[in-house]
């Protein structure tokens, strides 16, 4: 070592570099990387593990139970921090790393920062073929880690210790770029991890990062303002990018100044409070009658921070074909979709610039009143939908009970199956940025793992609030081991397991397209020899959680109060009906593939009904 260099292994240098990256949030400096999730194997324990041990105070390492759930936890953490901080995941070579593929895809679809530090085979190839190595006879350079290229925003394989001098800053720049944000993958061959190099000392100097706010182009703002001022029936679609830009206050001020109704995407579900007079409800396939009614009649749509996926657009049938779209988005790719008039730039700056250019424009009062009247009708429907009494137990009732009893700053987390639709439609936002409905990748198994990651982040800022996880029995059985993780780490979760006997929402789709129930509900699986009910309460208790089973929503309310009062992860189980109690209103058309030829008359009729709506589908790119 000299005064100018520091001799470290590749692994040691990576960890030392990460430990010296900082970001300022609300006037407070904190480490950009909140730590990591890790499962060790021969591909990462000896070298990267050694480096992480020495940095365990600066970068706490959470022991995972499953690599896929580690990635989900990292995604939940990044969402809670509004993409301003990230966690790394380290997995061993072979199946440990391949288990991260699904969570990398989730982070990619949702534009979430996550750093993967994954073991790889030996660069020298001297011991080849090693345990868990995939051999490609004609391409020895190809390996398992190449599979991450389609699901990473940044991908690299370190073949020399000096390469991290370039690779690490590039990975972090990608994860902090609002337009290109997503997972970064760095493959670490087992031998290269331990190779030493004389690194420049300045590589490890403290670095304070700031997330770029790109100002929109003045010409694009002028064109957008000209279009919006001509609108007689304008509407704002507020997406998750509004929250990531920390622009909820600007969105509210813009809507109020111009009296434009606001409808929310799934990711943007908590951009406005439930009782704000311009909050007309969620839009799309899992939306509300109120939002979809005005979306269909709107002549100009201002889409802010949304990638306009099919659940938002009703597979592009939710809007009139003649409606014009102004898309404010940091990502050029998203701003230019479906022949939109693009405003490429930060949501906060874009909203402010467009507001300044509108010069007193206000939506016609009759249009805004009409939207508000529709919202009042939807609110009445939700009140009846979540009510319970002489009705079968339902997701909506459970949501209503929790919504009425939770703290406004509690965070609700859900993902796959029927719960995203039910939460989106029935949850009443009590505080901004408190809803995480993972539907960018609609990933089963995210619920508990993502809740654990969110809870780690929540305890760094609001330790007195709770993270509430809503999960169905199917997703619970797919991935539940982070109940154990939450107990081990003292990160309390409140988990509601709503058991409807299988994959009930897909059974509903199956029936709605004319098909017979088959292979979704346990009762309809012809290969099941002995149907039986899982004792979810006992299973969760075996992982150390407080648990109880309730029979109805009234009992659920009492159990939820006990869970709130406790200090330990609490799992509450309730059966819900697989057929009755679904939210039946508020759905736009959604394109699913149906058989064009069939001998089943019910399937044929459902196909014809499905195709009849296609005439409304907006064509575009």
Image (cartoon, rainbow, N blue to C red):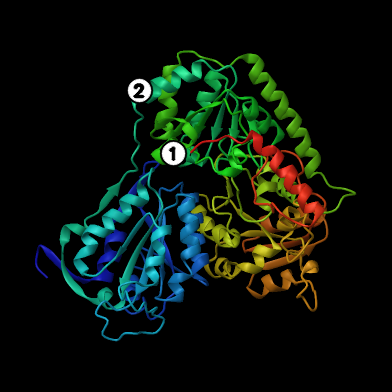
Residue 4 placement (x, y as % from top left): 10, 62
Image position of 585 with respect to 460: above or below: above
Q: Which residue is mark 2?
A: 219
Q: Which residue is mark 1?
A: 245
Asked if residue 176 lies left or right of residue 584, the reply is left
Residue 5, picture quadrant: bottom left
In the rendered image, the residue lying farthest to the bottom is: 127
Image position of 180 with respect to 547: above or below: above
Is 538 or 441 nearer to us in this picture? 441
Whether residue 331 is visible = no
Residue 352 placement (x, y as % from top left): 42, 25
Image position of 34 with respect to 312: above or below: below
Image position of 518 with respect to 402: above or below: below
Q: Residue at x 50, y 20 (%)?
A: 228
Residue 511 placement (x, y as % from top left): 78, 54
Q: Which circle marks residue 374 in the picture?
A: none
Give the Cα distance between marks 1 and 2. 22 Å
Give the foreground label among 1 and 2: 2
- Dot 1 and dot 2 residues touching (CB under 8 Å): no
Label whose residue precedes the other's in the sequence (1 or 2): 2
Q: Residue at x 59, y 63 (%)?
A: 445
Label 1 Cα neighbours within 10 Å, binned few <14 / some 14-19 / many ≥20: many
Label tally? 2
Give the SS element for disc 2.
helix
Is 499 or 409 nearer to us in this picture? 499
Screen quadrant of the N terminus: bottom left
Give the SS element for disc 1.
loop
Asked if residue 554 lies left or right of residue 376, the reply is right
Residue 582 placement (x, y as % from top left): 77, 48
Residue 284, picture quadrant: top right
Is 322 or 87 nearer to us in this picture? 322
């Amino acid at each position: 070592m000299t005064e100018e260099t520091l001799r470290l292994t590749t692994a040691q240098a990576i960890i030392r570099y990460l430990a010296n990256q900082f970001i300022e949030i609300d006037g407070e400096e904190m480490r950009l990387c909140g730590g990591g999730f890790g499962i060790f194997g021969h591909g990462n324990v000896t070298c990267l593990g050694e480096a992480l041990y020495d940095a365990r105070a600066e970068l706490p390492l959470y022991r995972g139970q499953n690599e896929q759930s580690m990635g989900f936890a990292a995604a939940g953490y990044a969402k809670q921090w509004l993409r301003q901080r990230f966690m790394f995941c380290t997995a061993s070579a072979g199946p440990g790393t391949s288990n991260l593929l699904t969570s990398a895809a989730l982070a990619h679809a949702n534009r979430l920062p996550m750093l993967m530090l994954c073991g790889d085979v030996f660069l020298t190839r001297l011991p080849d073929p090693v345990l868990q190595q995939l051999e490609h006879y004609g391409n020895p350079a190809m390996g398992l880690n190449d599979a991450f290229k389609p699901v990473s925003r940044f991908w690299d394989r370190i073949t020399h210790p000096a390469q991290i001098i370039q690779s690490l800053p590039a990975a972090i720049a990608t994860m902090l770029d609002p337009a290109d944000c997503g997972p970064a993958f760095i493959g670490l061959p087992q031998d290269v991890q331990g190779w030493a190099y004389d690194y420049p000392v300045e590589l490890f100097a403290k670095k304070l990062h700031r997330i770029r706010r790109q100002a929109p182009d003045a010409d694009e703002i002028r064109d957008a303002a000209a279009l919006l001022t001509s609108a007689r029936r304008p509407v704002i679609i507020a997406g998750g990018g509004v929250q990531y830009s920390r622009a909820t206050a600007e969105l509210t001020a813009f809507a109020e100044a111009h009296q434009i109704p606001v409808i929310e995407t799934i990711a943007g579900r908590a951009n406005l409070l439930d009782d704000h007079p311009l909050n007309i409800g969620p839009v799309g396939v899992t939306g509300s009658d109120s939002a979809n009614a005005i979306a269909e009649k709107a002549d100009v749509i201002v889409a802010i921070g949304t990638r306009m996926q099919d659940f938002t657009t009703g597979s592009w049938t939710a809007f009139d074909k003649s409606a014009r779209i102004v898309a404010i988005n940091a990502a050029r790719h998203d701003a230019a979709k479906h022949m939109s008039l693009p405003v490429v730039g930060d949501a906060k700056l874009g909203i402010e610039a467009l507001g300044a250019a509108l010069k007193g424009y206000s939506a016609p009062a009759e249009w805004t009143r009409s939207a508000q009247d529709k919202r009042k009708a939807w609110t009445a429907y939700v009140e009846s939908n979540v009510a319970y009494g002489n009705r079968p137990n339902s997701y909506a009732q459970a949501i209503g009970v929790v919504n009425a009893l939770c703290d406004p700053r509690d965070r609700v987390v859900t993902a796959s199956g029927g719960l995203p639709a039910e939460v989106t439609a029935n949850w009443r936002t009590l505080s901004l940025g408190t809803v995480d409905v993972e539907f960018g990748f609609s990933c089963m198994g995210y619920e508990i793992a993502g809740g654990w990651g969110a809870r780690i982040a929540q305890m760094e800022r609001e330790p007195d609030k709770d993270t509430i996880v809503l999960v169905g029995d199917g997703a619970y059985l797919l991935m539940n081991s982070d109940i154990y993780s939450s107990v081990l780490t003292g990160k309390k979760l409140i988990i509601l397991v709503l058991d409807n006997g299988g994959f009930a929402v897909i059974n509903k789709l199956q029936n709605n397209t004319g098909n017979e129930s088959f292979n979704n509900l346990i009762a309809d699986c012809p290969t099941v020899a002995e149907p039986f009910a899982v004792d979810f309460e006992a299973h969760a208790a075996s992982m150390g959680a407080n648990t109880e089973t309730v029979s109805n929503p009234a009992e659920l309310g009492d159990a939820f109060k006990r869970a709130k009062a406790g200090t330990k992860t609490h799992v509450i189980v309730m059966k819900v009906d697989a057929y009755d109690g679904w939210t039946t209103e508020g759905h736009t058309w959604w394109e699913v593939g149906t058989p064009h030829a069939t001998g089943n008359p019910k399937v044929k009729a459902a196909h014809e009904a499905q195709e009849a709506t296609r005439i409304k589908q907006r064509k575009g790119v």
